[in-house]
Image (tube, grey):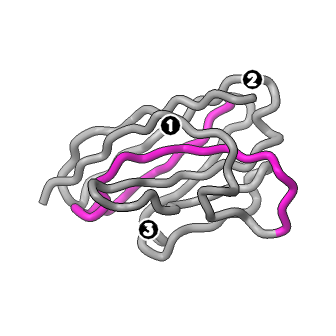
Amino acid sequence: QVQLVESGGGLVQAGGSLRLSCAASGRTFSSYYMGWFRQAPGKEREFVATMGRSGNSLSYADSVKGRFTISRDNAKNTVYLQMNSLKPEDTAVYFCAAGSALRVVLPRLLSEFDYWGQGTQVTVSS
């Protein structure tokens, strides 16, 4: 089992940047694929980005492609989400997630992730 703790959220003006971090407990972090999701008020939780175990495979939602970058440091048991050119519509609670199943295609569905953090609020003002 793995526990996930997000940090780095906050209030930023449109066009600004934030870097979210997600620290994972346990010694088997490199055996999990990792993802970021977000949930805006009144909306369903949606996929943002995912990364494979080694960090060589990536996938992004169209809405963040070219602006957000997911990365991981297996030595630090941490996954990051660098968010640039932020827009007011990026305002949401951001969650990191981990999964362990063997999959051919990088997962993008909530149901494909086994463990979730508590979330960190990102607010982008216009």
- Neighbours of disc 3 within 10 Å: few (<14), some (14-19), many (20+): some
Where is residue 74? Give x, y as percent. Answer: 73, 36
Classify the position of the C terminus by image quarter: bottom left
Which of 119 and 73 lies nearest the eye of the viewer?
A: 119
Task: State the residue position of label 1.
Answer: 21
Q: Which residues are magenta?
A: 77-104
Which residue type does callout 1 highlight? Ser
Where is residue 85? Give x, y as percent. Answer: 31, 62
Residue 120's quadrant in the figure?
A: top left
- Neighbours of disc 1 within 10 Å: few (<14), some (14-19), many (20+): many
Decide if residue 55 is on the left or right side of residue 89. right
Decide if residue 68 is on the left or right side of residue 114. left
Q: Residue furthest left?
A: 126
Structural distance between the alpha carbons of marks 3 and 1: 17 Å
SS for callout 2: loop
Q: Is residue 8 magenta?
A: no
Task: State the residue position of label 3.
Answer: 64
SS for callout 1: strand
Q: Is residue 93 magenta?
A: yes
- Neighbours of disc 2 within 10 Å: few (<14), some (14-19), many (20+): few
Residue positioned 60% across, 45% down in the render: 97
Structural distance between the alpha carbons of marks 1 and 2: 16 Å
Q: Where is 62 relative to 37, above or below?
A: below
Which residue type does callout 3 highlight? Val
Q: Earlier in the sequence, mark 1 or mark 2?
A: 1
Q: Earlier in the sequence, mark 3 or mark 1?
A: 1
Q: Earlier in the sequence, mark 2 or mark 3?
A: 2
What label sits on residue 26 in the rendered view? Answer: 2
Q: Where is 94 relative to 44, above or below?
A: above
